[in-house]
Image (spheres, helix red, strand yellow):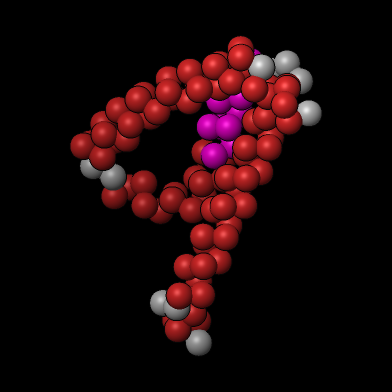
Amino acid sequence: MLNKLKNSRFLGEIYLFACVSFWAIAFIWTKDALSYGLSASQVIFVRYTIAVILMLPMVWKDLKKLTKTDIILGGIGGLLLAPVLLLLLCHLQKDGYLRIFR
């Protein structure tokens, strides 16, 4: 029964619902955090820290399988994504778009 559930479409839909729920909560939390005076860099730091804490137990056993190439490409991806997110949040904070949602 458990093996059948792992391969079912239902499990995929549960994961999709969880992903969308976390995304929505993160959006609301980010909007509120910026509205209450946290800087964009503080919000990004907290978001990434929470993500690492929540995801680390799920991938702990697979960390030993990472190759040097995987680590380098992951680092490059993170270095490219963080400035984009920082610029987006700074722009939203500076132009007052977040005040609309209060």
Front residue of 51/21: it is 21
Front residue of 23/53: it is 23
Q: Is residue 49 magenta?
A: yes
Q: Position of residue 20 (x, y in %)?
A: 56, 52
- Single out the residue that lies furthest toward the bottom: 1
Give the residue drawn at x 69%, y 35%.
Answer: 29
Q: Is residue 46 visible?
A: yes
Q: Quadrant of residue 8?
A: bottom left
Give the residue drawn at x 48%, y 25%.
Answer: 85
Give the residue drawn at x 26%, y 31%.
Answer: 72
Q: Position of residue 49 (x, y in %)?
A: 56, 32
Q: Position of residue 84 (x, y in %)?
A: 42, 23
Q: Is residue 45 visible?
A: no
Q: Is residue 10 above or below residue 86?
A: below
Q: Quadrant of residue 42?
A: top right
Name the image quarter holding the C terminus: top right
Q: Specify the segment rendered in magenta.
A: 39-51
Look at the magenta stretch and give its main secondary structure: helix
Give the residue drawn at x 66%, y 17%.
Answer: 96
Q: Position of residue 98 (x, y in %)?
A: 68, 24
The image shows a total of numbered marks equal to 0
- Single out the residue that lies furthest toward the left: 69
Front residue of 72/86: it is 86
Q: Is residue 16 magenta?
A: no
- Single out the residue that lies furthest toward the front: 100
Q: In the drawing, does residue 93 fall left or right of residue 63? A: right
Q: Is residue 93 above or below residue 6?
A: above
